[in-house]
Image (tube, rainbow, N blue to C red):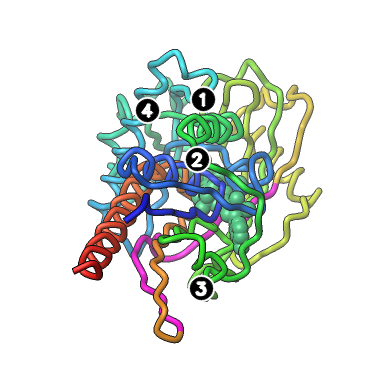
Amino acid sequence: MAAPKVAVVGAGVIGLSTALCITETCPSCSVTVLSDQFSPNTTSDVAAGMLIPHTYPGTPIHVQKQWFKETFTYLFAISNSAEASEAGIHLVSGWQVFKNTPKEELPFWSDVVLGFRPMSEAELQKFPQHRFGQAFTTLKCDCPPYLLWLEKRLKATGVQMYTRKVADLWELHSEYNVVVNCAGIGAHQLVGDEKLFPIRGQVLKVHAPWVKNFIRDGDGLTYIYPGIHRVTLGGTREKGNWSLSPDPGTTKDIFDRCCSLEPSLRGAQDIQVKVGLRPTRRCVRLQREVLSQGGVKLLVVHNYGHGSGGFSVHRGTAKEAAHLVGECTAALQGSSSRAKL
Ligand code: FAD
């Protein structure tokens, strides 16, 4: 059989990292990325890109931990290389603070991030409204540079990338042997997934270079995440809201909440407002599917529905999706050699 042709639909962090893992695990595959939007116009560009996992209620914790660990290890190596600044990957230390002590004092990811420990009394004095806190060091992706870095690596390995909206996966049947669906919230329409819904997030990207440590309220709603050039202030979590228009009232609310955690932010400059739709499900849809139409089959691998934690687990889920693509190409090779007999 000739080199298997694989189409990856979607060019957010999930599509690009999945395409990269496919080139690594299946070098004989010819990989093409098809997407209606590329960076800087994806949800992935809006994200803060912090490696602090979100919990998927429908996925076993040990699986989520494995995805996070693989992603952390991969990005930690980049952060320690000469590629770090181009890829926008850096270590960042800070605090997660709680008004009341949480039921679970040790989150499942506490031994993956670095130096996880309870905050000292002296540290807690900075947050008079909070009673408990955790200090740790994690990684942060500056999202647009990281997406461009992934695109550059894909181009260097010969991956083709085309701007194209796919209305139906069957469009790709005559040209490709395997189709990988990494359409994020677009999968709601593309494959009619009613279990997938948006959680709207509005954030501010500001210039405040003196802010060096992250601060996250344990409720997950208010956060301050310093990047290489700008600080992300968040946020909102609006379930079922499809609006991509920034709301000025929300902007003021986010700014005030962040200033109550870090009063020096009152001096922040050049406030830009961004909105993104987190592609949310009870669990990431990471599975093979064989579509069938009039006796014709189309091999599909789904990898979407990463909700609030796509950056935190992207490499782990991309590796798993690439493994499923490998199973599809092995099945194709098996059936083509049987056909020759
Ligand atoms: P997307 O980035 O939306 O990419 C989907 C791609 O598919 C796009 O290129 C789109 O154009 C394409 N597409 C869709 N439909 C079609 C179609 N029919 N035909 C062709 N192409 C199609 N996660 C973290 O881990 N840490 C964080 O700190 C963090 N902060 C966040 C803050 C905010 C405000 C938001 C909104 C999200 C945040 N997230 C964070 C979550 C993270 O952004 C997502 O989980 C992740 O970006 C999902 O990536 P994706 O590639 O699946 O989706």
Q: Write down the residue under mark 2.
A: 159
Structural distance between the alpha carbons of marks 3 and 4: 37 Å
Q: Tell me if label 2 and label 4 are in contact, CB under 8 Å.
A: no
Q: Residue 187 colored magenta?
A: no
Q: Main secondary structure of the magenta part?
A: strand
Tell me the element at label 2. loop
Q: Residue at x 57, y 61 (%)?
A: 185
Which badge, 3 or 2, comes first in the chain's sequence? Answer: 2
- x and y, in percent, of residue 233 in the image: 63, 36
Q: Farthest residue toward the top? A: 82
The front one of 142 and 246 is 142
- x and y, in percent, of residue 95 in the image: 45, 30
Q: Tell me if label 1 and label 3 are in contact, CB under 8 Å.
A: no
Does the beta carbon of the residue at mark 2 sit less than 8 Å from ligand 1?
no
Tell me the element at label 3. loop
Q: Write down the residue under mark 1.
A: 87
Tell me the element at label 4. strand
Residue 56 quadrant: bottom left
Q: Residues within 10 Å of mark 3 (few under 14, many from 20)?
A: few
Q: Residues within 10 Å of mark 4 (few under 14, many from 20)?
A: some
Structural distance between the alpha carbons of marks 1 and 3: 33 Å
Q: Quadrant of the C terminus?
A: bottom left
Q: Write down the residue under mark 3.
A: 193
